[in-house]
Amino acid sequence: MPEGPAWGRLQRGEPVTGDGGGEVRPEQVLGPDREGRKIAYITDTRPCRGAVELARGADLVFMEGMFEDEMADEANKKGHQSVLQAAQQLREAEARRAVIVHWSPRYANDDLERVLEPARDVFPALEAGRDLARYEIPVKG
């Protein structure tokens, strides 16, 4: 059966008519249901409830962490957040993994791991976002 609308109908649990005229039922061609993957992208925000809810249970969150924690007040005044604040929200959201993005230009690439270290005590699955990096999200089940 060629790709197209028939595939969508099968995935919704509807039978379709095959190329030869016979009926094709979803259970004939689909495997068991599996959980989807969830990605969230959160930037240009100070800590807020909406960020936690967006990240809730996500497999991968790209989240702003513009400053180290000593600069949290300044970050919040500018509508941003610290890496530690990001980690606290990620822990509350029970996210699985996160990439910190939207770094302040005051930090060189060599600084990023140092800035992440205190936040990893709160949310260990943190990575520093890098331009052109690729991130895999394995299929569940």
Image: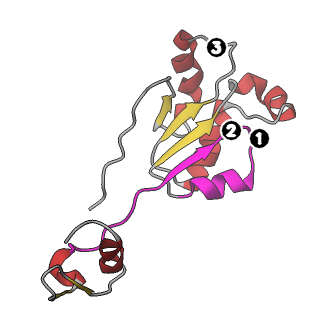
Q: Is residue 39 magenta?
A: yes
Looking at the picture, tell me which residue is in the foreground, 50 or 93: 50
Q: Which residues are magenta?
A: 30-56
Camera-near label (3 vs 2) is 3
Query: Could you say whether the residue bearing mark 1 is in a helix, strand or loop?
Result: loop
**Badge 3 or badge 1: first in the primary sequence:** 1
Looking at the picture, tell me which residue is in the foreground, 20 or 68: 20
Left or right: where does residue 96 sit relative to residue 84? left
Left or right: where does residue 108 sit relative to residue 19? right
Looking at the picture, tell me which residue is in the foreground, 97 or 39: 39
| Residue matched to label 3 | 107
- Which residue is at 50% across, 40% downward? 98
| Residue matched to label 2 | 85
**Neighbour tally class for label 1: few under 14, some 14-19, many 20 plus, Cα within 10 Å:** many
Q: Is residue 110 magenta?
A: no
Q: Are marks 3 and 1 in contact (CB under 8 Å)?
A: no
Query: x and y percent of residue 97 in the render?
Result: 46, 43
Query: What colouring method underlies this structural image?
Result: secondary structure
Looking at the picture, tell me which residue is in the foreground, 136 or 49: 136
| Residue matched to label 1 | 46
**Badge 3 or badge 2: first in the primary sequence:** 2
Q: Are marks 2 and 1 in contact (CB under 8 Å)?
A: yes
Q: Are marks 3 and 2 in contact (CB under 8 Å)?
A: no
The residue under label 1 is which amino acid type? Arg
Rendered position, 51 above or below 2 = above
* Screen quadrant of the N terminus: bottom left
The residue under label 3 is which amino acid type? Tyr
